[in-house]
Amino acid sequence: MDELIQLVKETKSIALDSKSAHNVSVKGLADFVTKVDTAIQEFMRSRLKDMYPDIQFMSEEKDNNDIDHTGKVWILDPIDGTTNLIHDFKMSAVSLGLVDNGVPVMGIVYNPFTDELFSARRGEGAYLNGAPIHVTSASNLSESLVIVGTSPYRKDLADVNFDIIKRLYIASEDIRRGGSAALDLCYLACGRAEGFFERNLKPWDYAAGVAILREAGGCVTDFAGNEPSYRVPSDILASNGIIHEEMKKIINE
């Protein structure tokens, strides 16, 4: 684990390259890739192949059709929060998860702008820069801070999404929008918020965060309460575990 943490931290110099961050290509509606994304992906792919040649590699900026999901798979988001990166919002992260036959067993999420590194291995707890972290004990939405996602790639869902956001806002203490699902999940894990939801997230957005949040005592499902998929996009609902059913009821009204 220490070796993997050090590897992820070595991406800092790439992530902080402002010139590469502003070398942008458009993939789709509100969907961008920068030279930072591609450089970190290639760096991590090469190093992980050398370290663990038998583990498959899945990442946002590559064709993943050849992945056998019954085995072990690295799931990388080289930069989660690319729009934030482009705007120098400093809320972006390198997210590396390990999924074994559909089960997240390890996660590392690193924000190079703040030097905060979240990590977890199944059965061994969750950590922020080496110190143990845990979700809060908030018992209802009225005393909870909820992080929301706006599904920017699916603006056709704006009406239904913002209707849910409004209902959660009314029921909760307040809402926030961070722009990096990986960091949002980690913020729940370390007690900075109690709930999170976003539609149509990709596996690399949440694979590492799921491992970290669960080891911190939290809960992650899809909107129906099932295990998220690590093959295709999922609608993600996450919480400290205590307010999960209350959030699920509001989301599915």
Image (tube, rainbow, N blue to C red):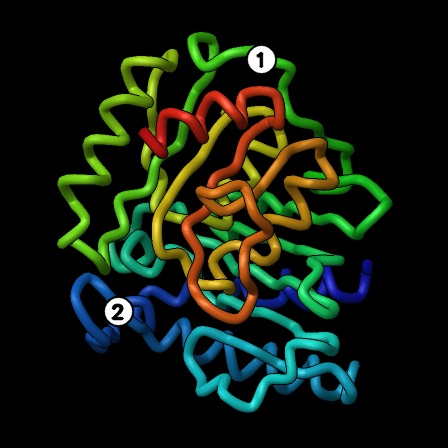
Quadrant (top left, top right, bottom left, bottom right) of the N terminus? bottom right
Tell me the quarter of the picture where residue 164 sits: top left
Tell me the quarter of the picture where residue 251 sits: top left
Left/right placement of residue 90 relative to residue 162 reads right
Left/right placement of residue 216 relative to residue 12 reads right
- Nearer to us of marks 2 and 1 is 1
- Residue 5's x, y, as percent? 72, 59
- Secondary structure at numbered mark 1: loop
Image mark for residue 138: 1
- Residue 38's x, y, as percent? 42, 79
Which amino acid lies under the numbered mark 2 shown in the image of this protein?
Answer: Phe
Of callouts 2 and 1, which one flags the residue occurring earlier in the amino acid sequence?
2
Residue at the limit of the structure toward the right, as seen here: 124
Query: Callout 1: few (<14), some (14-19), or many (20+) C-alpha neighbours within 10 Å?
Result: some
62 or 44, nearer to the observer: 62
Quadrant (top left, top right, bottom left, bottom right) of the C terminus? top left
The residue beneath circle 2 is 32
- Secondary structure at numbered mark 2: strand
Residue at the spot x=36%, y=25% of the render? Answer: 250
Residues under labels 2 and 1: Cα distance? Answer: 36 Å
Residue at the spot x=59%, y=25% of the render? Answer: 191
Left/right placement of residue 57 relative to residue 153 reads right
- Residue 158's x, y, as percent? 16, 44
Left/right placement of residue 60 relative to residue 160 reads right
Up-down relation of residue 34 to residue 223 (above or below): below
Up-down relation of residue 161 to residue 154 (above or below): above
Residue at the spot x=52%, y=50% of the render? Answer: 111
- Residue 47's x, y, as percent? 68, 82
Up-down relation of residue 67 to residue 161 (above or below): below
Which amino acid lies under the numbered mark 1 shown in the image of this protein?
Answer: Ala
Residue at the spot x=32%, y=73% of the render? Answer: 34
